[in-house]
Amino acid sequence: MQDANALIWHFVPCTPSCPSCGCPIAANSNENNNQTPENKVQTIEKTSKKYKGQQLMAMLLGVIGFFMLFEEEARTVGGIFCIIALIWYAIVGMGIWWEHD
């Protein structure tokens, strides 16, 4: 009679792995419980910190510009800030799409 684990593994599809290092990208939760720290599944983030920082700065500029719209003296500058923030955020979004998707 065959081992029960061998039968289970026969029906479990192969998990995808990183083309660079061969580390598994996703696995079943049952598999993760039995793994040592060296063999744990490694999550790969598609968006780099450079792009995340650019998105954050564009959002902050947009928020500052939005609140400046309510001040009579700074309304023009606030509008310019909002427009620049929207354009900046859109360009960063296109950069993320181009580099990572």
Image (spheres, grey):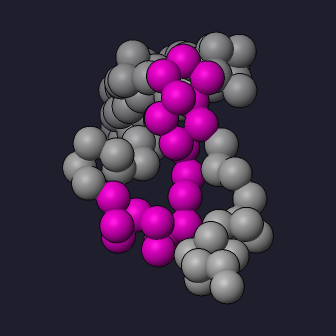
Q: Quadrant of residue 17?
A: top right
- Please, is residue 42 above or below residue 35 in the view? above
Is residue 3 toward the left or the right of residue 55 in the image? right
Q: Is residue 101 visible to the viewer in this orientation of the structure?
A: yes
- Tally the marks: 0
Pick whichever, 101 or 27, lies toward us: 27
Is residue 29 toward the left or the right of residue 96 in the image? left
Pick whichever, 48 or 82, lies toward us: 48
Q: Give the image location of residue 9, x and y in percent.
A: 65, 67
Residue found at x 71% / y 26%: 101
Say whether residue 87 is magenta. no
Q: Main secondary structure of the magenta part?
A: loop
The residue at the far left in this view is 37
Region in magenta: 17-35
Residue found at x 33% / y 58%: 35
Is residue 49 toward the left or the right of residue 86 in the image? left
- Please, is residue 66 above or below residue 74 in the view? below
Residue found at x 52% / y 42%: 24
Q: Quadrant of the N terminus?
A: bottom right
Say whether residue 22 is magenta. yes
Q: Give the image location of residue 40, x and y in percent.
A: 35, 50
Residue found at x 40% / y 64%: 32
